[in-house]
Image: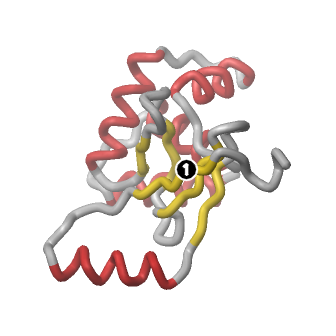
Amino acid sequence: MLNDFNEMRDVLQSANLRITMNRLEVLNILRKADKELTVLDILYTNEIANKKLSSSAVYQVLKHFEQMGIVSKFKINGEQALYCLKQENKNLRIYCQHCGHIEHFHDDVEFELKRLMQERSAVSLKLVLQKSRCTQCI
């Protein structure tokens, strides 16, 4: 557990964010998640742990994390925003419109897009491909 705390502290310090219990709790929930989470998912996970965290606090923490490049935020079809820790190889997603399954992929397309981003001084890459049914639905 101490190692986990040190890692989370380092993430916050490298982003020049003050270490608070709310930030540590949200960061820990996102770090342990195996999928993208909504604010409600974060609140529910937090409630199970019997810790007090308001929705406004979660939104505020996520806003700061997004501004500092710690998390990625994206929406699909105007649904609730989904959040996950920012990772180099998780920028491209395939979203199943039937079941909501999200698959991450990394291949030459992403490399080419990143090259174009550099060439045109773009600051972020968020791409979601949608399909009517995924392999889990078939």
Q: How far across and how far down the image is residue 18, in percent?
A: 32, 42
Q: Residue at x 14, y 73 (%)?
A: 121
Position above or below: 77 against 67: above
Position above or below: 22 against 134: above
Position above or below: 116 against 72: below
Could one spot residue 33 in this view of the protein?
A: no
Seen in the image, is 81 located left or right of residue 65? right
3 vs 12, nearest the viewer: 12
Query: Which three-letter amino acid code belongs to the residue tagged 1?
Result: Gln
40 vs 30, nearest the viewer: 40
Q: How far across and how far down the image is residue 26, in percent?
A: 52, 36
Q: Which residue is mark 1?
A: 130
Seen in the image, is 132 located left or right of residue 81? right
Q: How far across and how far down the image is residue 101, in percent?
A: 69, 45
Model colouring: secondary structure
Q: Callout 1: 10 Å neighbours few (<14), some, many (20+)?
A: some
Could one spot residue 73 in this view of the protein?
A: yes
Q: Residue at x 33, y 55 (%)?
A: 69
Res 28 → quadrant: top right
Res 25 → quadrant: top right
Q: How far across and how far down the image is residue 129, in percent?
A: 51, 55
